[in-house]
Amino acid sequence: MTALFTDDAYLSTCEAVVTGITPDGAIRCDQTCFYATSGGQPGDTGFFERANGDRIAIATTVTGDSKADILHVPAEDQPVPEIGEKLVLHIDWERRHRLMRMHTACHLLSVVCPHPITGASVSETDSRVDFDMAETIDKAEVTERLMQLVRDNHPVFTRWISEAELDANPDLVKSKNVRPPRGLGHMRLVCIGADSAIDSQPCGGTHVSETAEIGDIHIGKIEKKGRENRRFRIRFGPAPS
């Protein structure tokens, strides 16, 4: 299966051919623009359009036996397509774009707070990033530094490196507990800033193409989760006055 979102996060629709149906009713296609749940980012929702105009509502997208095995999970009581049937896939673009903006904001937070990441979860309105850090930090200061990176409108792009290159640059991996999947021989980096001057880290998620597209964000709360763990909650909109 070809994961089209890997190279073009702005692709909201594509044509595809059904290649399989799982016993649970999930749909496999030869290619897809639907992102599957991974790395703290939820899978895409949307619908499949059949040749006669009927729709198959997709409730979520997940992975199967491997990251390359993308399964589109229909909502309840949806029609089942035929193997070999041609469909037009439509993601819920408004939801996806909010997730792209938020996921990119999480990357910026890891720049402002350069500590090992112990957990993360991206959502449409309120996301969290957990850091291995003991000191306290002012949320207004973090918000201002985040918004400065947004206002500076740095480019966001991807590039590929070999697993050997990643091994030679272990600091690219910011997660304390999770390592990027291996075995393909190469890794996808999400880079921010000209020549990756702001950030560069392995990530398979979807992101906007420039930081200004994130819009207003702020740190809503910083929670203490253990002696050396701090949870930062990112929210859309300007910080409350």
Image (spheres, rainbow, N blue to C red):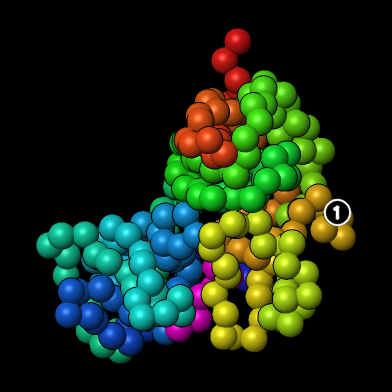
Q: Is residue 49 visible?
A: no
Horizontally, is 191 left or right of 176 in the view?
right
Q: In the image, is residue 113 above or below residue 195?
A: above
Q: Is residue 182 visible?
A: yes
**Location of the C terminus (image quadrant):** top right
Q: Residue at x 77, y 38 (%)?
A: 149
Q: Looking at this view, name the residue that lies furthest to the front.
A: 227
Where is residue 240? Give x, y as percent: 57, 15
Q: Is residue 222 left or right of residue 83?
A: right
Q: Position of residue 229 (x, y in %)?
A: 54, 39
Q: Residue furthest top?
A: 241
Q: In the drawing, does residue 7 fall left or right of residue 61?
A: right
Image quadrant in which the N terminus is located: bottom left
Q: Is 94 above or below relative to 50?
A: above
Badge 1 is on which residue? Answer: 197
Residue at 12% from the left image edge and 62% from the top image edge? 77
Residue 151 image-quadrant placement: top right
Q: Is residue 169 above or below residue 57?
A: below
Tell me the element at label 1.
loop
- Coordinates of residue 104 in the picture (x, y in percent): 63, 48
Residue in the image at 69% along x and 80% along y: 163
Q: Amino acid at mark 1?
A: Ala
Q: Residue 118: x and y, percent?
A: 54, 50
Q: Is residue 185 above or below residue 224?
A: below
Q: Residue at x 38, y 72 (%)?
A: 63
- The answer to if 161 sits in the magenta stretch is no
Q: Is residue 2 magenta?
A: yes
- Left or right position of 54 against 2: left
Q: Which residues are magenta?
A: 1-6
